[in-house]
Image (cartoon, rainbow, N blue to C red):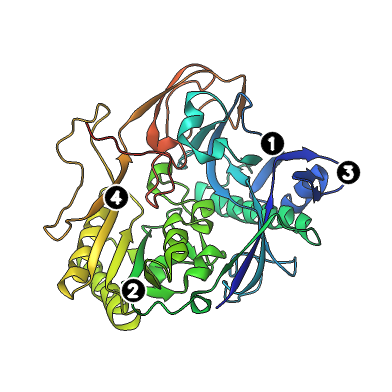
Amino acid sequence: MRLEMKYFDVMRAQFGAKTGFASGVLTIDKDELIGRLSGDPRIGSIDVVCAHPGERIRIANALDIIEPRVKGAGDHYFPGMLGPMYQAGEGSTHALRGAAVFEIGALPGLSGSLVDMAGEGARYTLHSKTVNICLLTEPAPGVEAAEYAYALKRAGLTASVYLAQATIGARPDAVEVFDLGGTKDAGHLPRVACLIQLHSHGVSREPFVYGSNIRHYYPTALHPNEILDGAIVCGHYNLSTGLKNTTYTLLNHPLILGLYRRHGVEIDFRGVVVTPEPTSLSDIKRTSMMASGLLKNVLRADGVIITKEGGGHTDVDLMENCNACELIGIRTVLIDNEWLSPDGDGEFPLLASSPNADAMISVGNMDALVALEPMDRIIGGTKLSGGIDADLRNHVMCPIWSIPNAISQAGFTYLSTEVR
């Protein structure tokens, strides 16, 4: 399976008479874009605004973030979600690198996030460095949160494909090929795979795999190209930002990219297994047994890196997957966040543990707080839905879990560890 990623670097976005891309500038026909997004009766109103790095702008109530993408033919992406069903991970894909589409909306039952484009808060998120195209929406009267979320999902994906179509016919700034079979023989190197737990605890807490909530799946082996090419889409709307992987994160999954770029040099990258995070212990044990079997008997992995989504309950899934792999001879490394209270002196950082979990990477303390100064402009509302009970126009003491990728369970974060 060979995927050719063509990257088009976006330095600025502006509104104009015709959507196009040239010399790092994305020009957007605002009326045409809004027209593409306005047909859904679940959305009462919609506007589009842009935010650039360094501007004193605070973006509030972002529910998902998406990198604009389109297949080389220029008419589709996100199989099973927008257009026809097809296998992702092959052919040519155009990506607007450095740009991001923000789905923005506020309603009880939704959990929004906050991005400062300047100041102290900008240090914690990579999206203070992206050119952000913000879809500001209001729900139609009487629409429930879950239906509004589905409408936002469609709007965000539609906008992403529409914007990426501006690159058709343009020369890319960079090209990267992903092809496990195209590298030199790696048979003499350690065989490493990754196991990605996807949170699947109900409506509005649902990662979509080829358009379907993964709770309908058993553990499944996917080619890493499929994940990098839009097979999985974030559908988490009432889950805190620090506990989920946005669509942008999935498309640029740092674990997959890191293993890919070491393939044939340091490791033999065997592939990916994705697995749901069930709600009962019997189901957790079943899925962990099946996932470890795929890793050993299908991917023939010597070692596996395991990531999760979700809160403390999903530590149980993490430890059961760790145990199942270690018991059949697969060495494990786990990636997880901690719960250590705001000042970091908590005694029980994880809900579950295992003596087999002897190699773990922490992506930070979910309870930490960040002091944010006022910004000159607020996009998306002055209150954070499902988050901060404060006026966002003022100084804010912000929980770190409300800033996208400040805590990233995929490791897509700027935080590091200091030993004292």
Disc on the earlier residue, 4 or 3? 3
The earlier-in-sequence mark between 2 and 1 is 1
Q: Position of residue 205 (x, y in %)?
A: 42, 54
Q: How far, Cα to Cα, is label 2 from label 4? A: 27 Å
Disc 1: CA contacts within 10 A as few (<14), some (14-19) or many (>=20): some
Name the residue carrying label 1: 50
Residue for badge 4? 336
Q: Residue furthest left?
A: 355
Q: Which residue, given by chain and number where applicable, does mark 2 sit on?
A: 189
Find residue 251 and report its horizontal and vertical position in percent: 53, 58
Which amino acid lies under the numbered mark 3 shown in the image of this protein? Answer: Ala
| Eye-nearest disc, 2 or 1 | 2
Q: CA distance from mark 3 to mark 2?
A: 54 Å
Q: Secondary structure at mark 2?
A: loop
Q: Which of the pair 299/47 is nearer the observer?
A: 299
Q: Please indicate, yes or no, whether residue 378 appears anywhere in the rendered image.
A: yes
Q: Does residue 268 lie above or below 63 as drawn? A: below
Q: CA distance from mark 3 to mark 1?
A: 16 Å
What amino acid does circle 4 point to? Asp
Q: The C terminus appears in which quarter of the rendering? A: top left
User: Which numbered disc flags the more N-terminal residue, 3 or 1?
Assistant: 3
Q: Which residue is mark 3?
A: 17
Front one among 376 and 106: 376
Which of pointers 4 and 3 indicates the residue nearer the eye? 4
Which residue corresponds to the image point at 81% horizontal and 62% vertical from the top-left?
169
Classify residue 23 as left or right of residue 313: right
**Distance Cα–Cα, label 4 vs label 3:** 47 Å
Residue toward you, 265 or 291: 265
Q: Residue at x 45, y 36 (%)?
A: 403
Q: CA distance from mark 2 to mark 1?
A: 46 Å
Residue at (33% x, 78% y) in the render: 188
